[in-house]
């Protein structure tokens, strides 16, 4: 690092860089990145952040402009080429191989072997020792390096992905939504490692929608909107509200102090449900017109609960009862376990999964098919698709949720993350289910698209639907929920009513499983 009174040379320069597919998605971006600097790159989904990051790390060629790395021309032809020059990227979508061990994934391109004549013999002890050293960089040295990646939780997999890219020869490290699946403790470990890399002169581009993180860790703010650079400034010169306005072009309000919604009829009751060590004796009620939040650390059992309620996993204990939202509360379905998710859907339950790409969407299929998939019968007659009716329904939903697309025939896999998530929401709006389970519904979604999704969820609650929302973002739950249940070690520790919680009390419950399991709220 140069003396503080010297003007450092940028390690990376970006000059008038743009990218055009059919239309321009990135236009005339110019930036300087300095050694030891953390540059926060933010903007709405589709603003061009991922495109710029992919150009820098060699995944996409630029259509115009040029870059330099340490004063030399820099035009990486591939990701491997960029990595050989010290430019690495941790992508939001995991690239680990699930059938390999943690150690094998960490050292895939440099697995130690026994030499020239025994090249096929892997030195397991050395491999595991090196892997443990690498895991320690993100505070995850307790993970057994012999564990298959498929056996890890999503949050742990993300930490392994980050650890794989924290190499000592790194000059520029791009982190794309690195904390989207991390617990507060894991996020803290990551920030410690970012500070360590900073002190060693590594330049970091930190892509995130979590504004509080940007304020906490970054030196410089860069905002893109509609593929164009709209602001470069010191991060401490702007507030979170300023950043939001720069991103979306207008102010977006967040109401953490709103009153509790009126509670309607009981729509779903889960009594003593469980599955092995993952879910232990959980009882909860969902009411019409309210949002029940579900908080907890990664691996606490939150996702497993919604999967049991939807029939994606088989419940082993207790029972689930679904009621009609009508006078007298007739029972719609009462089961120990659903035969399949289709049975839960028929009973009026929908699920937005935590991983939209692998579990929620048909990426190669158009928006139209992904939207009406939840209720094909409503757009069919005598087994024949009524195309005109389908088109009208999908068009109305695209307009309602402000989905940015070229047409409803556009493959959903080509949309930005926020617009993909809106398509999933529109799917369940089309189905008109009474109970909607949402697992990390705004993960990787910008503040503008997030506000659109919140508005739709609010409208669903007001129309008498029951929502169960799992989220790692406590502020999101504090904004949206009427009650927040906290899980730890597979148990539901406590349910807080609106007005009774603080961020501190929710975190304390998440780290403490000594409370008695809670009973359902009395009807």
Image (cartoon, rainbow, N blue to C red):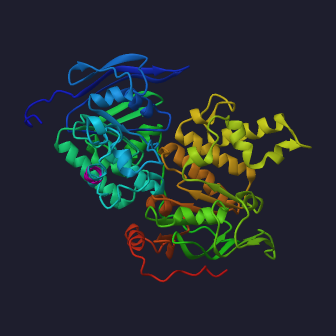
Can residue 239 be seen at all in this image of the molecule? no
Q: As drawn, is 126 to the left or to the right of 152?
A: left
- Residue drawn at x 46%, y 63% as measured from the top left: 299
Can residue 21 be seen at all in this image of the molecule? yes
Along the viewing direction, whichever of 336 and 144 lies nearer the viewer: 144
- Residue drawn at x 26%, y 55% as measured from the top left: 136
- Residue drawn at x 67%, y 62% as measured from the top left: 311
Along the viewing direction, whichever of 83 and 456 lies nearer the viewer: 83
| Residue 130 forms part of the magenta stretch | yes
Which residues, given as a range, are shown in magenta? 129-135
Q: Where is residue 2 in the image (x, y as percent from the top left)?
A: 10, 34
- Image quadrant where one finds the C terminus: bottom right
Q: How many marks?
A: 0
Q: Position of residue 179 (x, y in %)?
A: 39, 51
Q: Position of residue 75 (x, y in %)?
A: 33, 20
Q: In this view, does 437 lie above or below 122?
A: below
- Image quadrant where one finds the N terminus: top left
Q: Position of residue 504 (x, y in %)?
A: 37, 69
């Amino acid at each position: 690092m140069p003396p503080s009174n010297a003007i450092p040379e940028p390690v990376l320069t970006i000059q008038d860089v743009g990218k055009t597919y059919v239309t321009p998605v990135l236009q005339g971006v110019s930036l300087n990145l300095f050694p030891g600097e953390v540059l926060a790159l933010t903007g709405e989904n589709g603003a061009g952040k991922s495109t710029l990051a992919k150009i820098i790390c060699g995944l996409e060629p630029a259509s115009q402009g040029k870059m330099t790395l340490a004063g030399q021309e820099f035009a990486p032809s591939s990701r491997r080429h960029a990595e050989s020059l010290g430019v690495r990227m941790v992508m939001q979508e995991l690239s680990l191989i699930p059938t390999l061990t943690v150690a094998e994934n960490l050292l895939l391109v440099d697995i130690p072997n026994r030499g020239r004549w025994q090249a096929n013999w892997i030195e397991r002890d050395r491999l595991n020792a090196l892997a443990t050293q690498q895991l320690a960089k993100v505070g995850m040295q307790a993970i057994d390096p012999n564990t298959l990646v498929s056996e890890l939780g999503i949050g742990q997999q993300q930490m392994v992905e980050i650890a794989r890219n924290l190499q000592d020869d790194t000059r520029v490290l791009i982190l794309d939504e690195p904390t989207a699946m991390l617990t507060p403790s894991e996020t803290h470990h990551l920030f410690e490692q970012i500070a360590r890399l900073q002190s060693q002169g590594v330049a970091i581009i930190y892509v995130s929608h979590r504004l509080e993180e940007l304020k906490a860790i970054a030196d410089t703010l860069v905002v893109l909107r509609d593929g164009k650079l709209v602001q470069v400034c010191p991060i401490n010169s702007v507030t979170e509200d300023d950043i939001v306005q720069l991103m979306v072009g207008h102010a977006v309000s967040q109401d953490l102090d709103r009153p509790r919604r009126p509670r309607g009829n009981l729509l779903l009751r889960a009594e003593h449900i469980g599955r092995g060590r993952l879910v232990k004796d959980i009882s909860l009620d969902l009411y019409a017109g309210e949002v029940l939040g579900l908080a907890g650390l990664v691996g606490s059992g939150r996702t497993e609960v919604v999967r049991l309620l939807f029939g994606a996993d088989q419940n082993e204990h207790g029972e689930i009862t679904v009621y009609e939202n009508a006078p007298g509360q007739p029972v719609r379905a009462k089961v120990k376990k659903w035969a399949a998710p289709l049975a839960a859907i028929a009973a009026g339950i929908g699920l937005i999964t935590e991983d939209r790409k692998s579990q929620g969407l048909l990426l190669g299929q158009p928006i139209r098919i992904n939207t009406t998939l939840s209720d094909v019968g409503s757009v069919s007659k005598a087994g024949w698709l009524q195309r005109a009716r389908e088109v009208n329904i999908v068009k109305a939903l695209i307009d309602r949720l402000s989905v940015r697309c070229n047409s409803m025939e556009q493959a959903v896999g080509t949309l930005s993350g926020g617009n993909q998530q809106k398509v999933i929401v529109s799917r369940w709006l089309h189905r008109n289910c009474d109970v909607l389970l949402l697992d990390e519904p705004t993960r990787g979604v910008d503040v503008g698209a997030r506000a659109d999704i919140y508005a739709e969820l609010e409208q669903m609650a007001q129309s008498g639907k029951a929502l169960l929302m799992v989220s790692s973002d406590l502020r999101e739950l504090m904004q949206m929920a009427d009650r927040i249940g906290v899980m730890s070690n597979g148990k539901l520790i406590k349910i807080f009513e609106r007005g009774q919680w603080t961020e501190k009390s929710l975190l304390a419950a998440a780290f403490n499983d000594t409370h008695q399991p809670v009973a359902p709220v009395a009807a």
